[in-house]
Amino acid sequence: MPKLWTDTVEGHRHAVRAAVLDAVAVLIAEAGFSGVSMTRVADHAGVTRATLYKYFPDVETLLAAWHERQVGEHLAGLDKIRSEAAGTGRPLQAVLEAYALIVYDRPSHDASAPALHRATHIDHAHQHLEAFIADLIRADAQESAADLAMDPADLARYCIEALSSARSLSSRDAVPCLVAVTVRGIYT
Amino acid sequence: MPKLWTDTVEGHRHAVRAAVLDAVAVLIAEAGFSGVSMTRVADHAGVTRATLYKYFPDVETLLAAWHERQVGEHLAGLDKIRSEAAGTGRPLQAVLEAYALIVYDRPSHDASAPALHRATHIDHAHQHLEAFIADLIRADAQESAADLAMDPADLARYCIEALSSARSLSSRDAVPCLVAVTVRGIYT
DNA sequence: CGCGTATCTATACGGAGTGTATAGCAAAGT
DNA sequence: ACTTTGCTATACACTCCGTATAGATACGCG
């Protein structure tokens, strides 16, 4: 029996999709990426396997969709921080610190996920994140009238990778230091 | 029939192990990490599944062993570069540049592998690499009489992660720039 | 040399997950 | 009311896993 039913059919599909991605999140939290299978997700989401296959063709796509939603939420949060810090000097610093804290607090979830997709093909949401940070870098360079050491896009990827090392940082207080270390290098 | 037979039994086991890891390498090159299964590896290595299970209990261990061998080879190469560059000023720079070039030339193989293991448990060979670079950082700081911005171990992880962005660098000429950007930040 | 031991092959079995297909029921759309 | 859409329940063939057994082959050592 269909558990979820909103009045409209489109809303229903949206709700099912959300429930499925929630189930993915739970399974990942329980047993890591390898603990995610179509069967288990279907059971956990309260739908049949056949139904799940109508939404997602395979586990890979499922994980990609979950990751997309995750990064999307973070991107919204980071954008909020950017606009809040727009007046107070350097938004780049604030955004990168917020990102590093996310990585520090959720070591496995977010930092490992990109690696999973990079093996298959490019990650759409991650490209957004890269573009977002590349823009911040450009703006920061223009404001401080300093010369960038490299292409902003490459620097953005550098920042993201460098800050992903926040995952294994000894203490939470070291996060601002790591951000400082990372940012210091981008100007010539 | 056993294909490989060296005169001694210990040598034989070593040869089989090598053949198995070679098969893993081939399969990874062909279809990525998800293309590695016990069945396929056994077929490719010219042994039975039952035999393979006597050497490696599961795919995870198989990939870990392959990665261990890979990183071990690179570590040997980097150590050679370190001793060669010991007299000529900064070995840190030389080693990091060599590492970044490895990442650039083999985008998927080495940079993605740590991420796979970090999801499960800690990577032994990678710890060696981290310690190796941490030592280099300490030595570099002592020679240049400068103060490090953070714990050397954390800085080593920062360097490794930052340089793993060499994977998606626009051009090979940008590799030295990335190394410069990365190293610039480690001093206060 | 010859026996014991270690190793590999070949094969089989139950379990889990995959991908697909079908029939039937329930709710939305018009 | 009638059609369309979506979900359930179930089934099938396939792959891979992990383990077990019997028998062949080559080493190790007395």
Image (cartoon, coloured by chain):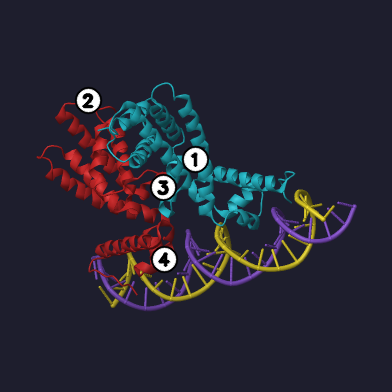
Chain colours: A red, B cyan, C purple, D yellow
Could you tell me how far apart the alpha carbons at marks 1 and 3 are, in whole angstroms?
A: 14 Å
Q: Position of residue A14 (x, y in %)?
A: 27, 61
In the displayed structure, A30 sits above or below A78; it is: below
Amino acid identity at mark 3:
Ala
Could you tell me how far apart the alpha carbons at marks 1 and 4 are, in whole angstroms?
A: 35 Å
Q: Are marks 1 and 2 in contact (CB under 8 Å)?
A: no
Of callouts 2 and 4, the N-terminal one: 4
Of callouts 1 and 3, the N-terminal one: 1
Could you tell me how far apart the alpha carbons at marks 3 and 2 are, in whole angstroms?
A: 33 Å
- Residue at the far left in the pictured view: A87
User: Which of the two marks, 2 or 4, is nearer to us in this view?
Assistant: 2
Mark 1 crowd level (few <14, some 14–19, many ≥20, 10 Å Cα): many
Secondary structure of the residue carrying numbered label 2 = loop
Secondary structure of the residue carrying numbered label 1 = helix
Mark 3 crowd level (few <14, some 14–19, many ≥20, 10 Å Cα): some
Secondary structure of the residue carrying numbered label 3 = helix
Q: Are marks 3 and 2 in contact (CB under 8 Å)?
A: no
Q: Position of residue B163 (x, y in %)?
A: 37, 35
Amino acid identity at mark 1:
Val
Could you tell me how far apart the alpha carbons at marks 4 and 3 are, in whole angstroms?
A: 24 Å
Name the chain under label 4.
Answer: A
